[in-house]
Amino acid sequence: MTSNPYFDFVQQFFTSYDCTILEKSDSHLKVQLTSSMDEEIMNRPFYWHYMKKMNRTGDPMQLTFTNTNHSNQGGIYLHAGTPKLHTIYRAAINKGKTARLYEAIEQPLQNRALCPWLVVNIHLHYRGKQSKDETLSLGLNLVHGTLLPNMMDRLREMEFEPTVSDYTFPMTPLINLENAYKRIERYVEGYVSSISADWATHSLEHLQEEKDLLESFYSSEDIGLEQFTKEQEQIDTRYRPRILMETINGGLFYISQNSNTYVINNTAAD
C-alpha cells in the first residue's frame, strides 16, 4: 500500500472513525462505512432523513479505492484531484477542530495527576496593500492560568491518546473554558496591538492615493456615479487595513506534572 501516498491517509481516517477495512492489497482498499460516516461523506441527505423519520438504522455503503486508473477491482481512483478524497479531507478537518487528549504514560511509579491545558490554534489574516497570514498556537493552563505561545511546538514530542492511561487521572479545571478562551482572545488582542503599524499606515496612504485618483476621474466626468461608487467600494475593500482572527482548531490536553514543568520551561519553543 506504499505506491500511492493517499492510501495511508484514507485507511487511517476510516479506521480512526470505526469504519471496517473489508479488503486491502497493494492496489485497492475496500471500506465498510458506518451510518454516521455515510451520512457525512456520501451526500445522501434524503435517504438518511427518511431512515431517521421511519426510525430505521439504514444501510451504510461500502467504498473501494484503487491506486490505478485501470484497476480490475473498479472503485475510486485515488489521486490529488479525486473529488471523494477532498470530501474526506473536509470531513477530517471538521472532525479535527476539537479534541480531548491525554498524555500516554506507561507504568507510573505512583498515581499521576494530569493537568489540563486549553490549546487553541489561531490564524491571523492581515489584509491591506499587502496581505499575509500568521498562525498562533496558544496554551492556557486551566489550573493556575499560565498562558504560553507556540504551544503545539511544546507538545510535539509527547505521545497522546484519546483515553486516560492506567494509574493516572485528569485534574478538574479551575478555570472554565469560556473564561479561558476570553483570556486567549485578550492575549491575541495585546499581541496585535504590539505589532508595528507601519503596514497599516502604508495601506491607508495607498488607499487615499487610489481614492484621490478615482476622484479626479469622476471630476472629469470620465465615469458615472454608479461606476464611481462601485470602484470606491472595491478600493476600500482592497486596501483598507484590517486583521481578521480565525480559530482553526483547539482542544483539551491533559499532561503529567513532569511534562507540565517541561512545557513551561521549554525556552526553545519561545
Image (cartoon, rainbow, N blue to C red):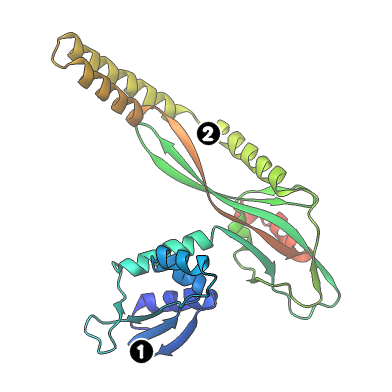
Residue 77: image location, x then y, percent: 29, 77
Identify the residue under disc 1. 26
Count of numbered marks: 2
Of callouts 2 and 1, the N-terminal one:
1
Residue at 30%, 69% (x, y): give it. Answer: 82
* Position of residue 36 in the picture relative to residue 257 (left or right): left
| Image quadrant in which you'd find residue 171 | bottom right
Residue at 35%, 69% (x, y): give it. Answer: 84
Give the label on residue 195, or none: 2
Mark 2 to mark 1 CA distance (whole Å): 52 Å
Dot 2: what SS? loop
Q: Is residue 96 above or below residue 185?
A: below
Quadrant the N terminus occupies: bottom left
| Image quadrant in which you'd find residue 27 | bottom left
Outermost residue to the left: 222
* Position of residue 116 in the picture relative to residue 206 (left or right): right
